[in-house]
């Protein structure tokens, strides 16, 4: 199994990411360093992250303070509050759905090919439609996660 560590730049409308074999503080810090390197002018960067404990370690927080990176954590089970989540739906749809990758390197190449295509075609109608669909899916989970009622199928 691999984990996709994704990063979405709101200002540039670009999506980047890497596949890693493990979740953890080391890979999270590496992702943050790559984000900082993409903005070498030293301007403050605000990074929205989920509440994974690996994102909150003392090394990560110290590095962030030193490098003008503000870590903004979403509440637990609040994927709807993270703008990058809407971009994961199209990523899954175009690279993983109905796929049968022979191994992880082949899957990683497909993911990176999609990222290159997506960044060159960010306003493509298929990308925008898939993003809208994912936003709707995430919003529909919001009420359930926050104590809302599950709607029954019975009339």
Image: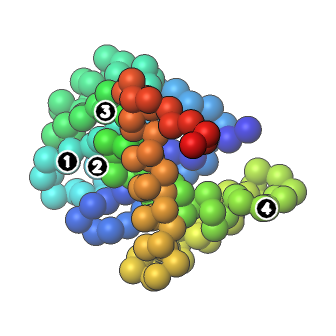
Mark 1 or mark 4, earlier in chain:
1
Residue identifier under label 2: 36
Mark 1 or mark 2, earlier in chain:
2
The Cα–Cα distance between marks 4 and 3, rounded to whole angstroms, is 31 Å
Residue density around tag 3, few if under 14, some if 14–19, many if 20 or more, within 10 Å:
some
Please give the name of the residue rendered at 39% of the width and 80% of the height, measured from the top-left corner.
123
Mark 4 or mark 3, earlier in chain:
3
Nearer to us of marks 3 and 2 is: 3
Nearer to us of marks 2 and 4 is: 4
Mark 2 or mark 4, earlier in chain:
2
In the displayed structure, 138 sits above or below 142; it is below
Q: Which mark is residue 99?
A: 4
Q: Can residue 100 be seen in this view?
A: yes
Q: Residue 74 carries which label?
A: 3
Label 2: which secondary element: helix
Q: Can residue 27 be seen in this view?
A: no
Residue 27, percent from left and from top = 50, 35
Please give the name of the residue rendered at 49% of the width and 51% of the height, measured from the top-left corner.
137
- Verify CB contact (< 8 Å) between mark 1 and mark 3: no
In this image, 24 relative to 77: left or right?
Answer: right
Please give the name of the residue rendered at 44% of the width and 29% of the height, measured from the top-left corner.
149
Residue identifier under label 1: 45
Outermost residue, left direction? 43
- Verify CB contact (< 8 Å) between mark 4 and mark 3: no
């Amino acid at each position: 199994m691999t984990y996709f560590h994704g990063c979405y730049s709101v200002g540039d409308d670009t999506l980047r990411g890497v596949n890693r074999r493990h979740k953890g503080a080391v890979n999270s810090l590496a992702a943050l360093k790559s984000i900082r390197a993409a903005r070498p002018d030293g301007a403050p960067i605000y990074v929205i992250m989920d509440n994974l404990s690996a994102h909150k370690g003392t090394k990560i927080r110290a590095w962030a303070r030193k490098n003008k990176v503000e870590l903004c954590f979403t509440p637990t089970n609040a994927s709807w509050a993270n703008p990058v989540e809407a971009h994961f739906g199209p990523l899954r749809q175009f690279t993983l759905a109905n796929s049968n990758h022979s191994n992880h390197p082949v899957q990683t190449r497909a993911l990176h090919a999609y990222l290159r295509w997506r960044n060159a075609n960010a306003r493509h109608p298929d990308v925008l439609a898939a993003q809208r669909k994912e936003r709707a899916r995430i919003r529909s989970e919001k009420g359930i996660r926050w104590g809302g009622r599950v709607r029954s199928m019975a009339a």
